Image: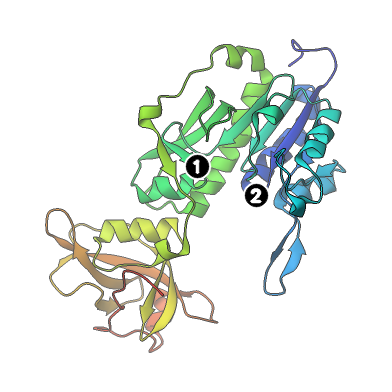
């Protein structure tokens, strides 16, 4: 970074969840090595969370407070008048400009940055995106990659533009998706990869910007935000689709009219075939609860191996723990529903 200026590079970091916090902490630790100074952190306003619905600071804000980094939490950067904002987008932009940033790094911020904001930092805004762009653009690239059965995903460092994740790609790092990966495990891997990827780019920013590659829009898919309804298991689906759904989402089903969470499942064994109705529990064993699923494209029904379930108001139970109760029995059924009220 010394080739940009003799003084420290002034960086604003914008993000909200833990995924972003991993990169922020990494950059804070490397400020002297990279010749950078994180002058401010931008994050979403505090939100109510937990049973007590108490206002809770984002993961990013919590890190910033530990290191005494100024925190800004604008509601919007839009110049359109919105009375509920309290502070106008023009004031938010002026505050940002007053930090005199050289670079703005964005990771899962959750706030739209208009062109006027993207132009404020001297070298623009860089995004740490959890997909090998242009494969998955949008809010839920990790979940969508698992659900689609992708064999790999990764991190893309992108020069931000006004479109949704459409900016030029500066650097990409791939990561395989294992058939045991869940949204959480893949999130954790990509958070670390993202932290190292942005560090690599910052070490020689002008070089990576000179090699920027335009995305091929024809290869792009929209990773739409996950909706609760998508977690409802339709046992008429094939076993592999259901197993990916369990790995990717907060999956749930119904047993004796109770809504229960299905927390984990083992990879599908393709020699485990059946002809019994979808949704029927074949066996409740110590290692897994075997459930019949619908037919795949070849007309073959496979069993899914569920390893953890949670009943309302209870703790997660392993298959072995369930086996010791009468909560589930052989030949019970999980209800087949395709939608909820």
Colouring style: rainbow
State the image quarter where residue 94 is shown. top right
Q: Secondary structure at mark 1?
A: strand
Percent from the top left, x then y, of residue 7? 85, 16
* Mark 2–mark 1 CB contact (< 8 Å): no
State the image quarter where residue 290 is shown. bottom left
Disc nearer the start of the sequence (2/1): 2
Determine which residue is flagged by label 1. 138
Decide if residue 268 is in sight here. no
Percent from the top left, x then y, of residue 157? 57, 28
Disc 2 and disc 1: Cα gap in Å? Answer: 18 Å
Residue at the (45%, 33%) spot, across then down: 132
Residue at the (41%, 57%) spot, across then down: 247
Q: Is residue 84 left or right of residue 238?
A: right
Q: Quadrant of the C terminus?
A: bottom left
Mark 2 residue crowding within 10 angstroms, few (<14) / some (14–19) / many (20+): some
Percent from the top left, x then y, of residue 156? 52, 30
Q: Nearer the viewer, mark 2 or mark 1?
A: 1
Decide if residue 245 is in sight here. yes
Mark 1 residue crowding within 10 angstroms, few (<14) / some (14–19) / many (20+): some
259, above or below 272, in the image? below
Q: Which residue occupies the foreground of this view, 67 or 92?
A: 92
Q: How many numbered discs, if any?
A: 2
Percent from the top left, x then y, of residue 295? 17, 62
Q: Quadrant of the N terminus?
A: top right
Q: Is residue 183 left or right of residue 159?
A: left
Q: Which residue occupies the foreground of this view, 226 or 116?
A: 116
**Residue placed furthest toward the bottom:** 326
Determine which residue is flagged by label 2. 18
């Amino acid at each position: 970074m010394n080739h940009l200026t003799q003084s420290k590079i002034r960086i604003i970091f914008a993000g909200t969840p833990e995924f972003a916090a991993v990169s922020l902490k990494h950059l804070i630790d490397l400020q002297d090595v990279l010749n950078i100074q994180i002058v401010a952190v931008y994050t979403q306003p505090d939100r109510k969370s937990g049973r007590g619905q108490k206002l809770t600071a984002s993961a990013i804000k919590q890190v910033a407070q530990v290191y005494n980094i100024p925190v800004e939490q604008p509601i919007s950067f839009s110049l359109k008048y919105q009375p509920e904002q309290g502070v106008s987008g023009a004031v938010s932009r002026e505050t940002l400009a007053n930090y005199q940033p050289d670079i703005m790094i964005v990771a899962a911020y959750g706030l739209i940055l208009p062109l006027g904001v993207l132009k404020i930092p001297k070298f623009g805004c860089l995004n740490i995106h959890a997909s090998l762009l242009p494969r998955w653009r949008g809010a839920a690239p990790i979940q969508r990659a698992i659900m689609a059965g992708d064999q790999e995903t990764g991190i893309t460092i992108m020069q931000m533009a006004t479109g949704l994740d459409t900016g030029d790609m500066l650097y990409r790092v791939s990561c395989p998706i294992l058939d045991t990966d869940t949204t959480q495990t893949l999130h954790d891997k990509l958070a670390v990869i993202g932290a190292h990827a942005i560090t690599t780019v910052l070490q020689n920013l002008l070089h990576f910007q000179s090699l920027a590659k335009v995305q091929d829009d024809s290869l792009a898919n929209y990773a739409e935000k996950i909706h609760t309804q998508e977690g409802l298991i339709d046992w008429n689906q094939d076993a592999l689709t259901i197993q990916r759904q369990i790995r990717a989402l907060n999956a749930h089903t119904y047993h004796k009219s109770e809504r229960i969470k299905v927390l984990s499942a083992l990879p599908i064994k393709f020699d485990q075939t059946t002809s019994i109705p979808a949704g029927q529990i074949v066996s409740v064993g110590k290692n897994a609860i075997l459930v019949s699923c619908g037919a795949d494209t070849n007309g073959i029904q496979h069993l899914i191996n569920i390893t953890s379930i949670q009943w309302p108001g209870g703790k997660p139970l392993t298959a072995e723990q369930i086996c010791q109760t009468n909560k589930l029995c052989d030949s019970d059924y999980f209800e087949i529903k395709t939608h909820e009220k």
